[in-house]
Image (cartoon, rainbow, N blue to C red):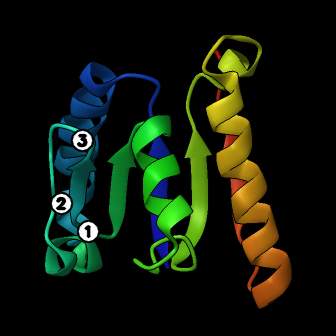
Amino acid sequence: KKVIYVAPMKALAQEVVEKFSSKLSPLKLIVREYTGDMQLTKAETESADVLVTTPEKWDVVTRKGSSGLGSDCGLLIIDEVHLLADGRGAVIESVVARLHRLVESSQRPTRIVGLSA
């Protein structure tokens, strides 16, 4: 199962990748950035233990449904979850709703964590 970390902006996603990579490398966990700027091959996404993405990118990836990444998600972390009240909140809400529907249909438990300052 993968950890999907949804950061509100690409700049923050880059910071999270750097920080997580240094902290998780002793555990041999692979952290990759998966944003509009960083396209990954199928092999790269499959080999990653942690994918750091933006709400818009994750929305596109899970909307297609063909990648299987949504069903491989064991933990979804949404940073700055208070942005649900913002203009981009609808994207975050649709991502969570889509994952919730996938969990119900597959009966695979997935944890969703929201972070806010």
Q: Residue furthest right?
A: 104
Q: Are marks 3 and 2 in contact (CB under 8 Å)?
A: no
What is the C-alpha distance between the residues marked 1 and 2?
6 Å
What is the C-alpha distance between the residues marked 3 and 2?
11 Å
Q: Which residue does the numbered mark 2 point to in the structure image?
A: 25
Q: Residue at x 43, y 59 (%)?
A: 61
Q: Earlier in the sequence, mark 3 or mark 2?
A: 3
Q: Please tell me in which quadrant of the rendered image residue 99 appears.
A: bottom right
Q: Which residue does the numbered mark 1 point to in the structure image?
A: 29
Q: Are marks 1 and 2 in contact (CB under 8 Å)?
A: yes
Mark 3 against mark 2, which lies toward the viewer?
A: 3
Q: In the structure shown, which secondary structural element does the residue marked by tag 2 occupy?
A: helix
Q: Please tell me in which quadrant of the rendered image residue 73 appears.
A: bottom right
Of 73 and 16, which appears nearest the observer? 73
Labelled disc at residue 47 = none
Looking at the image, residue 51 sits to the left or right of residue 103; the answer is: left
Q: Which residue does the numbered mark 3 point to in the structure image?
A: 17
Q: Position of residue 5 (x, y in %)?
A: 46, 47
